[in-house]
Image (cartoon, helix red, strand yellow):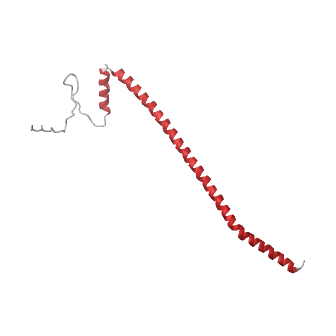
Amino acid sequence: MSEGKIITCIGAGILVLLTGGLWGCPKYNVYVKRLSGQAELERARENRQIRIEEASAVKESAKALADAEAIRAEGVAKANQIIGESLKGNEAYLRYLWIQGLGEGSSPTVVYVPTEAGLPILEAGRGVQAVPDKPAQ
């Protein structure tokens, strides 16, 4: 082969590669963008599914907490009923609890010596001024 034919073949090869590149690059860019769009769509679907699963978990958790609260409320109601039944007709114990509560209060309570019917009188009106009656119209 002569030197001129080799240069012509190399030139033709470069021309074919250049033409193929000019024709293929736009097609390749479209292909890449389509794949990118499909990947973005799939990512959005997965994120949506994750949010749905998280919302479902929150919903189940709220239902479980509501059930637990209902069970606790039933227990409190039963306990209150038992306590209420046990305190009926037990005046001495109620008086004992009242006296114990006087010592546990955060603010001091003034108690007078019992004077009527064996019950102490609390100083409930100390510092309160009497409101005058309204005149009749």
Query: Would residue 60 be found to the left or right of residue 11 on screen?
Result: left
Q: Residue 71 or 4: which is nearer the viewer?
A: 4
Q: Residue furthest right?
A: 1
Find residue 41 and report its image quarter. Answer: bottom right
Residue drawn 60% across the image and 53% down it: 43
126, 20: nearer the viewer: 20
Q: Residue at x 78, y 72 (%)?
A: 16
Q: Percent from the top left, x then y, of residue 92?
A: 30, 21
Number of on-image labels: 0
Q: Quadrant of the C terminus?
A: top left
Q: Which residue is at a point 31% across and 24% down the rendered structure image? A: 94
Q: Position of residue 10 (x, y in %)?
A: 82, 75
> In the figure, residue 38 lies in which quadrant?
bottom right
The residue lying at 41 percent from left, 29 percent from top is: 76
Left or right: 114, with 137 as reference point: right
Image check: 25 left or right of 52? Answer: right
User: Where is residue 8 drawn, in percent x and y?
Assistant: 83, 78
Q: Quadrant of residue 12?
A: bottom right
Q: Is residue 124 above or below residue 18?
A: above
Give the answer, above or below, for where 118 lies relative to 19: above
Of all residues shown, which one is farthest toward the bottom?
A: 4
Residue 118, position as x, y percentages in the image: 22, 22
Q: Locate the N terminus by quadrant.
A: bottom right
For the residue pair 63 and 131, the one nearer the viewer reads as 63
Picture layout, residue 50 above or below residue 95: below
